Image: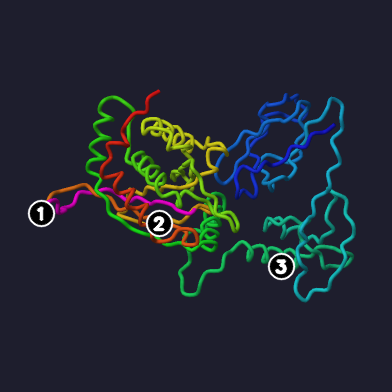
Amino acid sequence: MATSIVMPRLGDFMMEGTVVSWAKAEGEAVNQGDVIAEIETEKLNYDLEATDGGFLHPVVPEGATVAVDGLLGYVLAEGEAPPVAEAPQQAVAPPVTGAPKRAAPRREAGAPVASTPGARRLAAKLGVELADVTPTGPRGRVTDADVRAHAERQAAADTPAIPHGLPEPSRTEPLKGMRKSIADHMKGSLSATAQLSYFLEVDVTEAQRLRRESSKKGETTLGLPHVLIMASAAALGRVVALNSVLAGDNVLYFDRIDIGLAVAVTDGLVVPVVRDVGAKDIYSVAEEVQELVGKAKSGKLLPDDMVGGTFTISVLGAVDGFTPILNRGQSAILGAGRTGEKPVVRNGEVVIRETMTLSLTADHQVIDGEAAASFMRRLQQAIERPAPLFKRLET
């Protein structure tokens, strides 16, 4: 019996995917677990594996974009014919405004399109497919006027409206792929939550000293993002309200702390998740982050690497501070700007310290100001008295 190959759902917000390539040829034998195709989504590339053994029969070509759960092909038994798939509906171009509506005669696939010589010459010049043009001529023939009208409609559809007063753009690019996914997620997050941000400057002098000393010893190289992950886990362990997810009309609270770290890639951001941070030390967290960042940069993150975070951290070291936007569902996200030296007053004396601005965005539907302020105080204490963050867990 034929086994359907469908576009998998590789993330909570995935709507469609693209078949980058088929790993097996038409009719080639496959075993259960063999990689049969490479799938590309807005966030990652994924090796699709066969769920059954048999012979591959693709029904979409490489480069095709297919909705989630849409049919990609079949795995057939030996000698089995593929099921007869329902023919996809074809969009029909509207008739030219004001032109009489004529029913085009039925045309067999591949047969020549009834058209005038002028229509054929103009279609070749403009790069128009005659089969896509709505005919208005006698006996359903395509005329040159039909071709010209079709080309004008196509050009109007492909050309974005330019707001009045702006000059001609030097280049126009559609919002698509990862950028479109990020745009949709961010708008959805802002429209579904009551986001409020809090800012706090923290002294990172001691944390920087300890992480640099540890790195010089030839151990795991530590960065400030690793310190922020550990400090956030310590604060979330004390202020559990922020380690939560809003699901419909229910708030889900968690004892386990799974922290997502925003990573910049070519077309946008991905957020791989470090699991159960509270049960790990900074050295194992740093190694895990290094592996996840490497996979993100090379496009090798798996779907499971990017789901299930209960809290997110975004580090943007080029600016002093910013307002991060919540990942949909989560109750809080921490933003961290760049570090810098500045004069501060300590014990009545002016000294130079290294500081950083932190920004917490929380969903005010779930998190009150008191809980947010308590988290920020705990976070500040963990960062400014960081020795416990650098302790190794006994194995």
- Decide: few, some or many residues near mark 2? Use Cα within 10 Å; few <14, some 14-19, many ≥20: some
* Nearer the camera: disc 3 or disc 1: 1
Q: Residue at x 55, y 41 (%)?
A: 44
Percent x, y of residue 63 = 65, 42
Measured in 3D between alpha carbons, the distance from the residue under mark 2 to the one under mark 3, in whole angstroms, is: 62 Å
Q: Earlier in the sequence, mark 1 or mark 2?
A: 1
Percent x, y of residue 272 = 49, 41
Magenta-tinted stretch: 331-348
Q: Which quarter of the picture shows residue 135? A: bottom right
Question: What colour scheme governs how the chains and residues are painted in the rendered image of this protein?
Answer: rainbow
* Mark number, residue 348: 1
Q: Amino acid at mark 3?
A: Ala
Quadrant location, the C terminus: top left
Pick the front one: 288 or 198: 198
Q: Residue at x 57, y 65 (%)?
A: 160
Percent x, y of residue 266 = 46, 44
Q: Is residue 112 above or below residue 279?
A: below
Q: Is residue 224 left or right of residue 293?
A: left
